[in-house]
Image: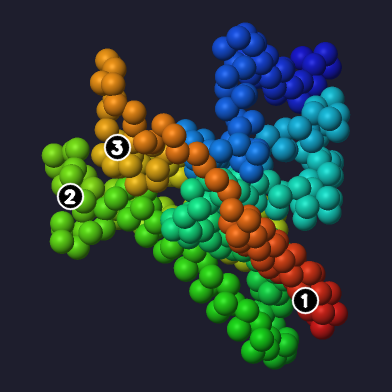
Amino acid sequence: MPEVIPAGGYPFLLVLYTCKKLIFPWKTRAPMWRAIWEVVSAPLYSPKFFHTYVGDIFTSMVKVFQDILWTLCFVFSGDFLRPEDLKDDLTPHPWQHAFWYKNVMIPLICLFPLWVRFNQCLRRYIDTSKRWPNLANAFKYAMSQTVTLFGAFHPLYMLHMNKKRQYATETVLESKPNNLFQVFWMGLFVSSSLYSFTWDVTMDWGLGKPRFGFLGPRLMFPNRLHYYGVIAIDLVLRFLWVLTLIPPQSGASFEMPQYLTAVTMSLELMRRTLWGFFRLEHEHRSNTEGYRRVDFVPLHFSTGHDHKYKKDKERIGWHVLAEVFTVTAIVIAISVTSVIAAQKATRHTRGEL
């Protein structure tokens, strides 16, 4: 059959079938695409709990988004029509080594879900005028974005540096500034992971209170060991999740090996599923984030009372908008500065080697 249908034709047919199921029947698919649009266009829509929940799930789908990008390039480049000869063709997909793919599109894909959640947090701040917990939550995603940028562009961890270290004569080239940047990145990596873990336990799950045995005042699951076990699992898997934010084929020595990709993604899906159970439990038990206007269940009949919450309107102050623009500008400036500094350091390092 290779003479009739090339090897890439079979996955191409699978892609077409998947696209068909994602679009048709449109009557049932339209709400899904409308919800996705409201999530990714966070600054334009006021996010509800559903939108933030989906946005958090998107942060666990970084590898899925990378695979979608690879599939689009595979289809539109026409590589699915090429016969595969593993012996003679050493670079079957040259576009995946191109600058625009490796250094532009892949880092943007890694940053995309983090940027969505960052914008959702800022929009929540605009709607509620509450710095806590909205700006603190936005800072969490800003830290993850910085980790991603350093992992994608910083040259001090490249494999070509590690290859040089095996020679004693060139070991002298490793200077103290390199070690300083390494300590900085490791500190940022650990801080971001611990920050996210602490936020999961204390804010998303409502646990971690010392007077209740580092759990919460009201628990829905009777066995307390379930909570302690999930907290321990989340601590370990949070560090693995941050490693998945580092773009593949970036050349970083701490890059996740390809053969562990499926394992890490399975573990992240398990972690996100557990996170979702306890996140919904906490939202069911309390009204911590103000997504509901009232903290009681309305009666099905009219009481004749004119509730004050029905007359409340959200007002956006200029000081709130100014703070939002300031925070966004700072995050963008840090991101651009990290990339520019990394590129300059790359040229300087390669010149020395």
Residue at horizontal 68 percent and vertical 74 percent from the top: 156
57 vs 240, nearest the viewer: 57
Mark linked to residue 345: 1
Cα gap from disc 2 to disc 3, whole angstroms: 17 Å
- Residue 295: which disc? 3
The residue nearer to you, when weighing 254 against 185, is 185
Of circles 3 and 1, which is in front? 3
x and y percentages locating residue 98 in the rendered image = 84, 50
Distance of label 3 from label 1 (alpha carbons)? 54 Å
> What kind of element bears circle 3?
loop
Check disc 1: other Cα within 10 Å, few if <14, some if 14-19, many if 20+: some
Say if residue 278 shows up in the picture: no
Amino acid at dot 2 = Pro
The image shows a total of numbered marks equal to 3
Q: Does 240 appear above or below 309?
A: below
Q: Which residue is drawn at 58% across and 48% down?
A: 316
As drawn, is 175 to the left or to the right of 72? left
Report whether 52 appears left or right of 335: left
For disc 2, the marked residue is: 217
The type of residue carrying mark 1 is Ala
Viewer-nearest of discs 2 and 3: 3
Task: Say whether residue 62 is left or right of residue 195.
Answer: right
